[in-house]
Image: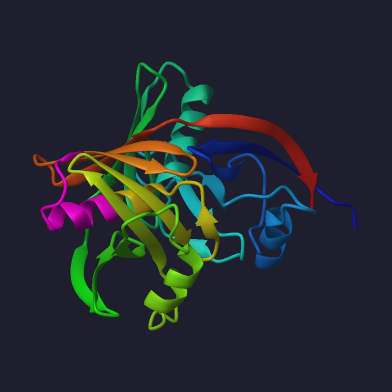
Amino acid sequence: MSKKRVLFEKMHGAGNDFILIDNRNQNFIPDTVNIQNLANRHTGIGFDQLLLILDSDVADCDAAYRFFNPDGSEAEQCGNGQRCISRYLYDKNPNKNQFNVSGLAGIIGSQINDDGSVTINMGGIRSIDEQIILKQTCFQVDFGNPHLIHIVDDTDTSNLNDLKLKFTKKHTNGINFEIAEILDDKSIKLRVYERGTGETQACGSGACATVAALQYAKKLTDKVKVILPGGTLMVEYNHNDNNLYLTGPTAYVFNGEFLI
């Protein structure tokens, strides 16, 4: 049986890396084996998540999105992935700088800024639950996808993997785990262990969930700089619409094709 060629873009947002497949003019089937093979950084392409763009059946949407983790599981949301999708759509249509895309997390609006950064309207937090785990205060946040936030004194010296295992034992279906270091009321350092992926260089939804939790705890102002291993993102809470806005850089790494 002959194999078919699939075109892709390799992109990243603050070090959070993706392959983007525009499926509107090709037919890539995202089955678990294909995704796991592509995700292998030694024998495949390697990525934190696979971004799949499709035609949207929602009125006034430019496209639809699906996100897949390296283990083949599907993710509801990915802030940095959303920003890369917006950059890709803009490069295909540079006369337009605002886009709407539809998917599991709902309709996501974005804007390409004059400095080349991309701002995503990530929507509102569904719930924040303050919990005591191992005698320490944590925050469980539902942001369309689940997050558990733990405050530490120093993110650099903390063992993220060990803390994730200890604090997320009851979450048998998996949860995104964040450790946050509060620098002041306008900036934090953050490391994220993403469900189905592992530690990533940056996580947009994790940045938003963490900022929202710490704003809820009255520890942060409305606009916060989030410093991650791969770069810096800005998260801003808008009182007018009760939504969180995520701003940061995007970049192309390379493009290519694979046979499947």
Is residue 125 toward the left or the right of residue 67 in the image?
left
Q: Is residue 259 magenta?
A: no
**Among the 4 quarters of the image, the one containing residue 71:** bottom right
User: Which residue occupies the extreme right position in the image?
Assistant: 1
The foreground one among 74 and 229 is 229
**Which portion, as a residue range, is magenta?**
209-223
- Where is residue 54 shown, x and y percent of the image? 52, 46
Is residue 90 toward the left or the right of residue 244 in the image?
right
Q: Is residue 214 magenta?
A: yes
Residue depicted at x 44% and y 52% = 156
**Among the 4 quarters of the image, the one containing residue 249:** top left
- Where is residue 241 shown, x and y percent of the image? 13, 43
Asked which colour scheme the image uses, the reply is: rainbow
- 212 over 8 or under it: above or below: below
**Among the 4 quarters of the image, the one containing residue 17:** top right
- Where is residue 194 shown, x and y percent of the image? 47, 60
Residue depicted at x 19% and y 65% = 128
Residue depicted at x 39% and y 36% = 232
Image quadrant occupied by the N terminus: bottom right
